[in-house]
Amino acid sequence: MKDDNFTLPLALLSVFLGWQLYTTYTQAQKLNQTLGICQQREQRTNEMIDKLRGFNQ
């Protein structure tokens, strides 16, 4: 009978931790996407700088 007292708190804890894991994962995915966009922009900027340097020579 003692085990029944832990069933609900354990279930709630599991749901809470699962939700935390899910939200952390989705935030990480968004950050990775943003990072990828920033890296693409940086690469394009560097290519433009190289082209401009070529015009100056």
Image (spheres, rainbow, N blue to C red):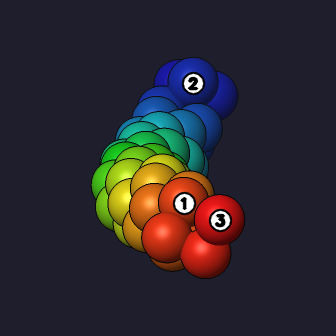
Q: Is residue 2 above or below residue 8?
A: above
Amino acid on which the number 2 mark rests in the picture: Asp
Q: Earlier in the sequence, mark 3 or mark 2?
A: 2
Badge 2 marks a residue whose secondary structure is loop
> Mark 1 falls on what kind of element?
helix
Nearest to viewer (mark 1 / mark 2): 1
Alpha carbon distance from label 1 to label 2 = 75 Å
Q: Secondary structure at mark 3?
A: loop
Q: Nearer the viewer, mark 1 or mark 3?
A: 3
Q: Residue flagged by tag 1: what amino acid is it?
A: Gly
Q: Compared with residue 13, is residue 56 higher up or lower down, i.e. above or below? A: below
Spatial CA distance of label 3 from label 2 is: 80 Å
| Left or right relative to 39: residue 26 | left
**Residue appearing at x 57%, y 24% in the figure:** 3
User: Label 3, on which residue?
Assistant: 57
Assess disc 3: are there few (<14), some (14-19) or many (≥20) residues with their C-alpha within 10 Å of its C-alpha: few
Crowd class of label 1 (few under 14; some 14 to 19; many from 20; radius 10 Å): few
Q: Residue at x 49, y 70 (%)?
A: 55
Which of these two is toward me, 22 or 30?
30
Given residues 57 and 27, the one toward you in this image is 57
The answer to whether residue 45 of the structure is visible from this angle is: no
Say whether marks 1 and 3 touch (CB < 8 Å). Answer: yes
Where is mark 1, residue-wise?
54
At a point 46% along the width and 62% down the height, the residue shown is 51
How many C-alpha atoms fall within 10 Å of the one at disc 2: few (<14), some, or many (≥20)?
few
What residue is pinned by disc 2? 3
